[in-house]
Image: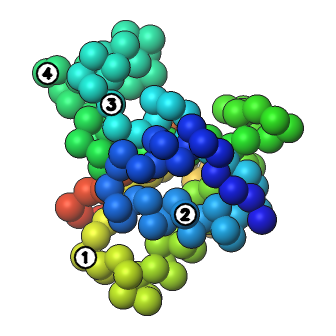
């Protein structure tokens, strides 16, 4: 079983309690270690703008705000061999599958409202290349695999 490090826990404590519940359950049941970068939770407009300027977000923090600025988003990054990795497709797929499992479990127990919806960057422009209606190693992942956010409506996949 994995555990979240100090930076991940500090960052996690700044976001929605529902996201906190899911991530805390995820780390207990995940088959891959993951963490939260210091800028992967709540962000100021200035912090969001810096990420935008680097080309890592479509939200500039001022004209177009990110869900990170309201505490309704988090970035989860696989942590493999002692470092964060952005190039391990299977690890990101494992993270999203673990999120979905933890979310379903917490909704079934009534801990998280069933009316709450989450959107995942791994599905933004995702292509099911083998037409099996599930995300797997053969697919093209979305452009922001680390990102997870609360929305008012279900995500169309």
Q: Position of residue 95 (x, y in %)?
A: 63, 55
Q: Earlier in the sequence, mark 3 or mark 2?
A: 2
Please tell me whether mark 4 or mark 3 is closer to you in this view. 3
Label drawn at residue 24: 2
- Rendered view: 58 above or below 141: above
Residue 74, how many percent across, how many down?
43, 45
* Of the two numbered discs 1 and 3 in the rendering, the one whose residue sits closer to the viewer: 3
What mark, if any, has residue 63 been given in the picture?
Answer: 4
Closer to the chain start, of discs 1 and 3, is: 3
The furthest residue to the top: 53
Disc 4 from disc 3: Cα separation: 15 Å
Q: Which quadrant is the N terminus positioned in?
A: bottom right
Identify the residue at horizontal 51%, vertical 82% (top origin).
105
Q: Earlier in the sequence, mark 4 or mark 1?
A: 4
Mark 1, Cα crowd under 10 Å, few <14 / some 14-19 / many 20+, is few
SS for dot 1: loop
Marks 2 and 4: in contact by CB < 8 Å? no
Report x, y in % for residue 70: 23, 42
Q: Which residue is mark 1?
A: 115
The residue that disc 3 covers is: 43
Q: Secondary structure at mark 2?
A: helix
Q: CA distance from mark 1 to mark 3?
A: 26 Å
Q: CA distance from mark 4 to mark 2?
A: 33 Å
Q: Quadrant of the C terminus?
A: bottom left
Instruction: Give SS at disc 4.
Output: loop
Q: Is residue 40 left or right of residue 69?
A: right
Q: Residue 5 shows which numbered tag?
A: none
């Amino acid at each position: 079983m994995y555990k979240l490090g100090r930076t991940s826990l500090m960052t996690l404590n700044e976001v929605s309690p529902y996201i906190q519940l899911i991530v805390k359950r995820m780390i207990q049941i995940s088959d891959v270690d993951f963490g939260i970068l210091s800028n992967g939770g709540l962000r100021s407009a200035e912090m969001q703008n810096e990420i935008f300027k680097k080309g890592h977000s479509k939200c500039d923090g001022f004209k177009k705000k990110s869900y990170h600025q309201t505490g309704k988003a988090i970035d989860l990054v696989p942590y493999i061999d002692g470092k964060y990795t952005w190039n391990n497709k299977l690890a990101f797929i494992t993270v999203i599958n673990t999120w979905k499992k933890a979310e379903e479990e917490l909704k079934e127990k009534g801990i998280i409202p069933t009316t709450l919806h989450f959107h995942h960057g791994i599905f933004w422009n995702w292509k099911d290349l083998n037409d099996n209606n599930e995300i797997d190693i053969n697919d093209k992942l979305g452009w922001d695999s680390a990102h997870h956010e609360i929305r008012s409506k279900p995500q169309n996949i």
